[in-house]
Image: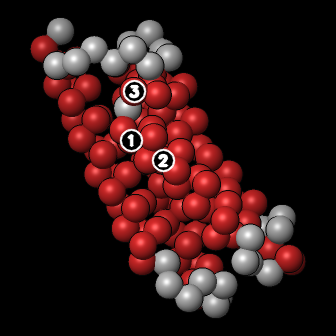
Amino acid sequence: MTKIRSHKDLNVYKVSLELVTKIYVLTKQFPDDEKYGLISQIRRASISIPSNIAEGAARQSAKEFIRFLYMSLSSAAEVETQLDIASKLGFLKDNKEITDEIVYIKRMLIKLIESLKNKVISE
């Protein structure tokens, strides 16, 4: 297994960073009166995904890293839910592509968590 030197080496970090950019572009089309509501919530939750990956990777132990990856996973679920709400409110016409990307990120996070758990068990 290749040693990870930085959170920037993780594909899940790279993909989640791209998601943030897409979320910012997507939420620009939302109504102005959502600036401090749904727009702010979705943006903060999406930013939280790569941020928690980075913070967890900088921790001293795999157990701590796992805890932060679970926070990233929770934030991904939050973004997914908020996009569903935005869709129900008519702010989005089709969010399948971005939802599929979130599902992909969640799968990568789960695989990384499982990998780290196996590392903790074998130590």
In the depicted view, which residue is nearer to us: 80 or 10? Answer: 10
Label 1 sits on a secondary structure element that is helix
Look at 38% across and 51% down and name the residue there.
Answer: 105
Label 2 sits on a secondary structure element that is helix
Comparing labels 3 and 2, the label whose residue is closer to the camera: 3
Residue type at numbered disc 2? Ser
Q: Is residue 32 visible in this depiction of the protein?
A: yes
Look at 52% across and 50% down and name the residue there.
Answer: 18
26 sits to left or right of 64: right
Look at 86% across and 76% down and name the residue there.
Answer: 32
Q: Are marks 1 and 2 in contact (CB under 8 Å)?
A: yes
29 sits to left or right of 85: right
Q: Mark 1 to mark 2: distance in Å? A: 6 Å
Please, which colouring scheme is shown?
A: secondary structure
Q: Label 3 crowding class (10 Å Cα cut-off): few <14, some 14-19, many 20+?
A: few
Comparing labels 1 and 3, the label whose residue is closer to the camera: 3
Residue type at numbered disc 3? Asp
Q: Is residue 121 above or below residue 73?
A: above
Residue type at numbered disc 1? Val
Disc marking residue 16: 2
Q: Position of residue 41 (x, y in %)?
A: 69, 60
71 sits to left or right of 107: right
Disc marking residue 9: 3
Q: Is residue 38 visible in this depiction of the protein?
A: no
